[in-house]
Amino acid sequence: MDAATLRATQAPIKERYKSDPDAALITLTAKGSVDSDGLTCKVETGRALATAGLHPATGGSGLELCSGDMLLEALVACAGVTLKSVATAIEVPLTRGDVVAEGDLDFRGTLGIDKETPVGFREIRLRFDVGTDAPQDKLDLLLKLTERYCVVYQTIKNGPKVSVSLERV
């Protein structure tokens, strides 16, 4: 897809959202089931069933997906698509591109060994390795816009309001 095709594809969508802001508000839903043996959760992905389990550092077998890995994978996927879209829109030719997300965890928090150790990622690093002959000012713009428009990155960075409930069924 080139920049003109991308703009043509998105133009009616953008116009609709400008004229009807409520149409732009969409609720995404993810569902899973813990109705299986073992310490797993089966997550519906829309294409298949993904089984998540404990990370090996917390006693998992390593055969199931780790939710921490899935979070980083979602970041990589979103950032990669956003980078490619922005590169297309601002006409930065990419001959190759890799997206890497790394996150540091201290499992003492998750396992309740040390109450002072936070549960969750201490730090997440996102890196783009791109092959291009574009000038540095275009690469700076590419990074700025990718960061600005990546939904998963912005969600992690800005920490949205989150609520939790438990209901008897």
Image (cartoon, rainbow, N blue to C red):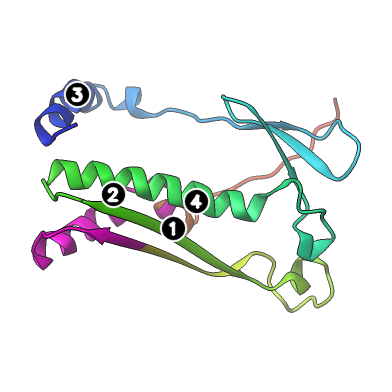
Quarter of the image where one finds residue 21: top left
In percent of the image, x 26 and y 22: which residue is there?
20
How many marks the image carries: the answer is 4
The amino acid type, in three-letter code, at marker 2 is: Leu
Q: Secondary structure at mark 1?
A: helix
- Horizontal placement of 73 versus 84: left or right? right
| Residue behind mark 3 | 9
Tell me, for residue 83, which label it has, or none: 2
Which numbered disc, 3 or 1, marks the residue that appears first in the sequence?
Answer: 3
Disc 3 to disc 1, C-alpha distance: 29 Å
Which numbered disc, 3 or 4, marks the residue that appears first in the sequence?
Answer: 3
For the residues bearing labels 4 and 1, Cβ distance under 8 angstroms = yes
The amino acid type, in three-letter code, at marker 3 is: Thr
- Magenta stretch secondary structure, dominant: helix
Q: On the rendered image, what quadrant is the C terminus found in?
A: top right
Q: Is residue 17 above or below residue 77?
A: above
Magenta span covers which residues? 128-153
- Horizontal placement of 146 versus 52: left or right? left
